[in-house]
Image: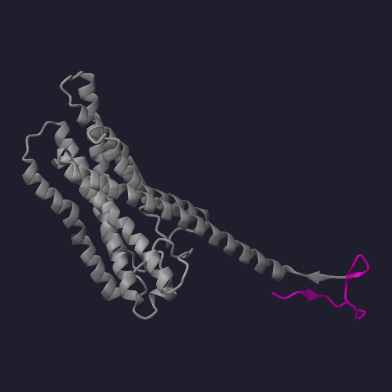
């Protein structure tokens, strides 16, 4: 910006208090305010990066430990714990994909992964268009989207399994487990592949993180919203079944079913409410304080969910202890 002074009718500089020349610093002040705002935003995003790095690291460590526990001890081998293990794996892969993206950018291109305009992808324009970087960052983006979908559909499997268990439905766990595998790992493929094709053919730029055409974004968001809504409906049904059984004082009501119900009822609102609240608030549509509120809650919940899942389904389980 420029500092300006005013020339008086007598050809002399206009003064203030009779001695000091009058100066207009408004352009400099505006520039300084803009710079301070950008610096404040950058520091905030650095704090967010530390937050989600700690969250994903803690989640990954806890999830790997939980998977080892469920795998090593034979007495824990059952359909219920197999489902838990698959859920842990989906969260572990998601955490790994995010951390690999950060490491890829920082080590290979020496860039700090802090982007206010594109925080969710955590991939910069310069890095994504440099040499062979595009393929790597797009692969990481695809893996992350697949894992996000897998998270929600494996949790849907958890809810469906618990509901069938509580209502006393007679079913072959072996046959149903195969269906659960298709639902948890197969369903995400059905949506991620069309999304990849749309991005490659229509929005093949940067790391496929920007949503210029929202129709492509909905290819992977609608199934997440659908899974979340179904989970919330099952949540209400499970709550109704539990209340009915508790009122009836059923002494034969298995303790492990109640523990499983408590864990699931804790997690369903966490998954469902989070997705439903922010489903329409995309990065392109949110600005100002609302954007940072969304960033904080999304990063916090996404990064620490794996830790909470592992604790509730494994380490807080009496069978494990």
Q: Residue at x 30, y 35 (%)?
A: 316
Q: Which residue is at the front of the view, 36 or 224? A: 36
| Residue 2 figure quarter | bottom right
SS majority, magenta? loop
Q: Which residue is at the front of the view, 222 or 34? A: 34
Q: Residue at x 16, y 52 (%)?
A: 183
Asked whether 17 falls inside the magenta stretch, the response is yes
Q: Residue at x 42, y 55 (%)?
A: 53
Spot occupied by residue 268 in the image (x, y as percentages of width and height): 29, 41
**Applied colour scheme:** one colour
Q: Which residues are magenta?
A: 1-20
Q: Which residue is at the front of the view, 67 or 136? A: 67
Spot occupied by residue 182 in the image (x, y as percentages of width and height): 13, 53
Spot occupied by residue 249 in the image (x, y as percentages of width and height): 21, 18
Q: Which residue is at the front of the view, 80 or 319? A: 319
| Residue 9 figure quarter | bottom right
Q: Residue at x 91, y 79 (%)?
A: 12
Q: Which quarter of the figure is the C terminus placed in?
A: top left
Spot occupied by residue 319 in the image (x, y as percentages of width and height): 22, 33
Q: Which quarter of the figure is the N terminus placed in?
A: bottom right
Asked whether 121 falls inside the magenta stretch, the response is no
Image height check: is 125 above or below 311?
Answer: below
Q: Is residue 148 visible?
A: no
Is residue 179 left or right of 64 when viewed as pictured? left
Q: Is residue 127 visible?
A: yes
């Amino acid at each position: 910006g420029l500092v300006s002074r005013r020339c008086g009718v007598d050809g002399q500089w206009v003064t203030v208090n009779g001695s000091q020349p009058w100066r207009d610093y408004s352009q400099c002040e505006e520039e300084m305010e803009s710079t301070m705002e950008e610096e404040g935003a950058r520091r905030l995003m650095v704090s967010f990066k530390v937050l989600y790095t700690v969250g994903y690291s803690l989640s990954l460590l806890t999830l790997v430990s939980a998977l080892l526990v469920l795998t090593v001890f034979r007495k824990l081998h059952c359909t219920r714990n197999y489902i838990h293990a698959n859920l842990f794996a989906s969260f572990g892969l998601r955490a790994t994909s995010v951390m690999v993206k950060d490491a890829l950018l920082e080590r290979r291109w020496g860039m700090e992964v802090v982007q206010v305009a594109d925080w969710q992808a955590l991939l910069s324009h310069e890095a994504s268009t440099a040499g062979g970087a595009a393929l790597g960052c797009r692969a990481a983006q695809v893996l992350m989207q697949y894992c996000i979908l897998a998270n929600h559909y494996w949790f849907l499997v958890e809810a469906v399994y618990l509901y069938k268990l509580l209502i006393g439905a007679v079913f072959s766990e072996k046959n149903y487990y195969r269906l659960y595998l298709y639902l948890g790992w197969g369903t995400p493929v059905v949506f991620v592949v069309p999304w990849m094709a749309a991005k490659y053919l229509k929005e093949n730029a940067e790391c496929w993180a920007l949503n210029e055409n929202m129709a492509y974004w909905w290819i992977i968001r609608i199934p997440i919203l659908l899974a979340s809504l179904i989970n919330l409906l099952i949540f209400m049904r499970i709550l109704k079944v539990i209340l009915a059984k508790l009122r009836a004082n059923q002494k034969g009501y298995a303790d492990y079913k109640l523990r499983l119900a408590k864990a699931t009822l804790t997690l369903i609102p966490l998954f469902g409410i989070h997705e439903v609240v922010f489903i329409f608030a995309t990065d392109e549509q949110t600005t100002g304080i609302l954007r940072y509120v969304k960033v904080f809650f999304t990063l916090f919940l996404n990064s620490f969910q794996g830790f909470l899942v592992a604790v509730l389904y494994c380490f807080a389980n009496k069978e494990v202890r």
